[in-house]
Image (spheres, rainbow, N blue to C red):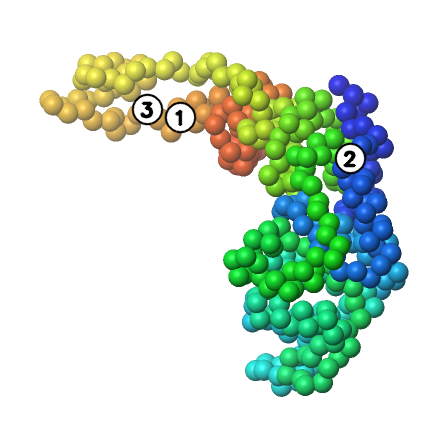
Amino acid sequence: MTETDMPLTAATPDASTPRTALVHGPGSPLLDLVRTCARIAMSDATVLITGETGVGKEVFARLVHERSARAARPIVAVNCGAIPEALLESELFGHVKGAFTGAVSARRGRLAAAEGGTLFLDEIGELPLSLQVKLLRVLQERCYEPVGSTEAVPANFRLVAATNRDLAADVEAGRFRRDLYYRLLVCPVEVPPLRRRRGDIPHLFAHFWAARGERRPVDPTVLKLLEEHAWPGNVRELENLVERLSVCSEGSAIRVADLPSHLRPDSFEVTPLAAPPLARPVVEAPSSASEVRALFREAEAPAPVAPGAVHLPEEGGIDLPGLLRTLEDAYIDAALTRTGGNKKAAADLLGLQRTTLVEKLRRRQRESAPAATATAG
């Protein structure tokens, strides 16, 4: 298969395309969503973006900002679930000197940093109830007070919030304020999950593949399997898979065998390895003293046997670790031959992690280096 066989249709994005670019295929449900966001961007209305984890809510938040009259000013993103509750108020509103222990100087908050621009509150469903009240006041009165201050500061920003939670259910459960919920629900935008826009998958794959500088072709069956996957992690899961394929796949093209096992079809089976030829024949475990003596004679090492016991020879005994290493090396070589040198596929055949196989190969290389040096000397 050549590079022209790579089934990444339409204009394949190159590595210069921004990571947050909105990538989709023809007829995608995102087309209507983009038009809606473009209309919303012309106003200063508050926007609430909902959708599952990993669908790209921040991409749409930035799209609204970049198409608005505030595009010349910054968009300031705050992950409400990633900042400890004790620090979140200061992060949002800032504080004055001496407001609390450790406040040795005044500090501007994220609201001040977003002055004239857009404040993006990601995972707003994680915002504590105490701060929900203060945020509601800011939205209603367009001013706020830094922590430790009694002086109101005017606020000029556009709010875009996002969540993967069902805020309506949180309102009924008392976890989210009803008045703030309806204050946010001015211009709702719901981003559909990846499983509802499967036609976008080849284009997203091409975008992430090119962004990593990859030019290796991809088997069409691989993309077909990706389009059939449910993608519970959505676009983020797809991006992580692309990185995995880029890093772990060593072949000249991406095949079905390179995919994680949960993405392969049920009918896909790894052909078991035939037993490779060994330096010594495999023998069953001896069950009697006579068999033990015969085994030692085969190894050209006499084995004195006392009545009722078997003793290993004092000299010239069987090199069991060496035999096991020979067996292991033979299977590794057979697996690499079977897979054309693809370490990931060879590790799958052997029931190993790829990193384990790589370490075994490195150890073998280290051990053979001194021997090669001695031979050369």
Judging from the image, what secondary structure is the residue with disc 2 in? Answer: loop
Q: Residues within 10 Å of mark 2 (few under 14, many from 20)?
A: some
Question: Residue type at mark 1?
Answer: Leu
Judging from the image, what secondary structure is the residue with disc 1 in? Answer: helix
Q: Is residue 330 visible?
A: yes
* Residue 324 disc label: 1
Foreground residue, 40 or 57? 40
Q: Residue, x 65% and y 60% (percent of image)?
A: 181
Quadrant in which the N terminus appears = top right
In front: label 3 or label 1: 1
Question: Residue type at mark 2?
Answer: Ser
Residue under pointer 3: 318
Residue under pointer 2: 28
Q: Earlier in the sequence, mark 1 or mark 2?
A: 2
Quadrant in which the C terminus appears = top right
Q: Is residue 98 above or below residue 236?
A: below
Report whether 68 appears left or right of 335.
right
Judging from the image, what secondary structure is the residue with disc 3 in? Answer: loop
Q: Residues within 10 Å of mark 3 (few under 14, many from 20)?
A: some
Place of residue 360 in the rendered image (x, y in percent of width and height, measured from the top left) = 51, 33
Q: Is residue 85 above or below residue 354?
A: below
Q: For residue 5, which quarter of the picture? A: top right
In front: label 3 or label 2: 2
Place of residue 273 in the rendered image (x, y in percent of width and height, measured from the top left) = 49, 17
Q: CA distance from mark 3 to mark 2?
A: 68 Å
Question: Residue type at mark 3?
Answer: Ile
Place of residue 286 in the rendered image (x, y in percent of width and height, measured from the top left) = 24, 17
